[in-house]
Image (spheres, rainbow, N blue to C red):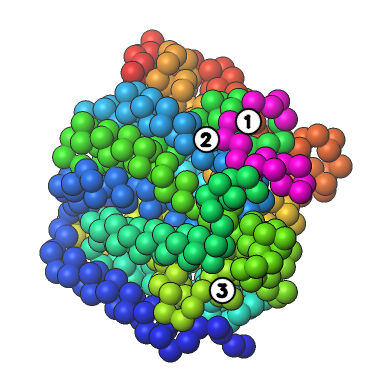
Amino acid sequence: MSTPLTLVDWSIIALYVAAVAGGGVALSRRPTRSMREYFLGGNQMSAWVVMFSVIATNQSAATFLGGPDYGFRGDYTYLASSAGAVLAALVATRYLLTRFYELKVTTVYELLAIRYGEGAKRATGAMYLVGRVFASGARVYIAATAVAMMLFFDIEPQSVMLAILAIAVCSLGIALMGGIRSVIWSDLGQFIVYFGAALIALFSLWSQLSLTPAEMISALRETPEGVNKLVLFDFSTDFSRPFTVWAILTGVFLLNLGNFGLDQDTTQRLLTCRDARAGGRAMIASSLVAIPIVLVFVTIGQLLYLLYERPDLMASTGGGELMPEFNGESITVFMSYILSEMPDGVRGLAAAGIVAAAISTMNSGLSAMSSVLISDFYHPWKEAAASRRPEHYVLAGRLGMLLFAVLLSAMAVLCFYWQRYTEMALLEFALAVMSFAYAGLIGVFFTAVFTDRGSSVSVVAALIAGFVTILVQQSYIVDSLGLPIYMKSLSFPWQLLIGVGVSIIVCMAGSSGPARRTRLS
C-alpha cells in the first residue's frame, strides 16, 4: 500500500498530533477529584470555548466531507437547514436548558426522574447510549474512510478498519487525560485546524479555476443538466428531498432540538458553563456561527463541480479529473481533490484538518456516554450498596470511555457495510442515523414538558416505539421483509417526524397519577 503524502505533509501532521498530545498533558496536570468536575468541568468553562466545542461536536468529519459532497451533487439547500438549527436552539434554551441548570443535573435524563421516576431516567439514558453509538459510529466510519485514503490510498475494508483503530486510540487518549475540560479545549483546537484547512482548500480551488465570480455564478445557475445549483430555499413537496423548506421546519427542526436539548453529547458541553444564561448564549451562538462554516464547505463542493464536471470551462485552465480509484464513491470527491490536486505542504495542512475532524468525531462522544453510564446507572447502583469516594467514580468514568471506544469502533465497522447498501449520500447518512434515538427521546420529553400524561411504563414503550418506527423505514429492513417500497422513499426528516408522532401517542397513553402530574416547563 502507498500514500500520496510526502515528508513535508507527514511533518505537518506529526506537528499537529504532537500539539494535541502536549495540550492534553498540560490539561491533565490539574487533578480531577469529583464526578461533577470530571464530567462538567466544575461549571467553570467559558461560553465562547463551549460554543466552538459544540460546533466541532455537531460538524467534525460529517461536515468536512459531507458538506462538499452535498455541494458537488446538489445545491445550497443544506445551508438553509441552518434555520432549523437556530429555531431549535431558541426553543431548547427556553424550555430545557434553564431547567437543567435549576435542578443541577449531570445528565439531561435526570430530569425525567422527577416526573416519572428512576425507571424512566434509566430508560431514556439507555436509549441515548444506543442512539449515540449508532450516530457517533457512523461519523467515525466517515472519518476513517478519509484517513484510510490518506494513509493507504485505498478504501479497502482492512484499511478502513486500521484507520478506525488509529482514530479510537488517539481520541481515547485525549478524553482520558482531563475529562470534559480536556475534550472541550481539544475540540477548539481541532475546529481551528479543520476549518483552517477548509479555508485553504477553498482558496486553492478558487485560484485554480481562474474564473470570475460572475462566470462561476452563471455556470452554477445554468448547468448542462438543466439544474440550478444556487437554489437556497426549496419549496417543493418532494418528500424524498431532505432539505425542503417544509422538511426544515419540521423534521430538521426536531433533529436539532434533539441534538441541542436531549443529546448528552451536546448538552454536557452546555452544562459546563457557569449558569443557564451563559449556556444559552453558547447554544444560540453555535447555531449562528455554524452558518458561514457550512457555507464554506458547501461552496467547496460547488467549486469542485466546476473543476471536475465542467471541462468546457476548464479548457484553458487545466481542469482536473476524479481519481479512478475513487470515482463513483459518493464520499470522496473532496478527498480526491486534496490527494491529487493540492501541492505538497498544503496537502499536509488539509490532511491535518482531516485528522482533527476524525479525532473530534470520536472523543466528543466518549465523555458524554460515559457520564450517562456512570451518573444514571453505575453511581445509583454503587451508592445503594456502599459509599464510595469521589475518585472511584472518576476511575469508573475512564473505564466507561474505554468501553465506548470499543463499541463505537465496532459500530463504525458495521456502518462501512450499511452505508454502501443504502447508497445514501454521506451527509444524509450521518444525519439519518441520529433519528434512531431522537424519535423516542423527543416524544418522551414533549409529553413530559407540555402535558400531564405519561408514566414510567409508557416512557419505555414510547422509546421502543420511536426506535422501531425509524428501523422499519430503513432500506435493508424494507427489502428483507418485503414491505411496500414507499416506506423507504421518505427522507430522514419525514421519517423522524413520523417516529416522534408515534412516540408521543404511545407515551401519552400512560397516566402518571395525581402525585406526578406537574409539568416540567
Is residue 298 in view?
no
Mark 2 highlights which residue? 80
Magenta-highlighted residues:
220-238
As displayed, is residue 257 above or below residue 429? Answer: above
3D distance between C-alphas at marks 2 and 3: 30 Å
Which residue is pictured at 63% across the width and 53% down the height? Answer: 72
Confirm or deny contact between disc 3 and disc 1 (CB under 8 A).
Answer: no
Magenta span: predominant SS is loop
> What x and y, as percent, mark residue 156?
67, 76
Q: Secondary structure at mark 1?
A: loop
Whichever of callouts 2 and 1 sits on the residue coming sooner in the sequence is: 2
Confirm or deny contact between disc 2 and disc 1 (CB under 8 A).
Answer: yes
Graded by Cα atoms within 10 Å as few (under 14), some (14 to 19) or many (20 or more), the crowding at tag 2 reads many
Graded by Cα atoms within 10 Å as few (under 14), some (14 to 19) or many (20 or more), the crowding at tag 3 reads some
> What x and y, as percent, mark residue 163?
53, 74
Is residue 164 in view?
yes
Q: In the picture, residue 328 is in which quadrant?
A: bottom right
Mark 1 highlights which residue? 234
Graded by Cα atoms within 10 Å as few (under 14), some (14 to 19) or many (20 or more), the crowding at tag 1 reads some
Q: Secondary structure at mark 2?
A: helix
Of residues 102 and 145, the one drawn nearer to the viewer in this rendering: 145
Which residue is pictured at 67% across the width and 59% down the height? Answer: 313
Which residue is pictured at 36% across the width and 27% down the height? Answer: 90
Whichever of callouts 2 and 3 sits on the residue coming sooner in the sequence is: 2
Residue type of the residue flagged with mark 1:
Asp
3D distance between C-alphas at marks 3 and 1: 33 Å
Whichever of callouts 3 and 1 sits on the residue coming sooner in the sequence is: 1
Mark 3 highlights which residue? 341
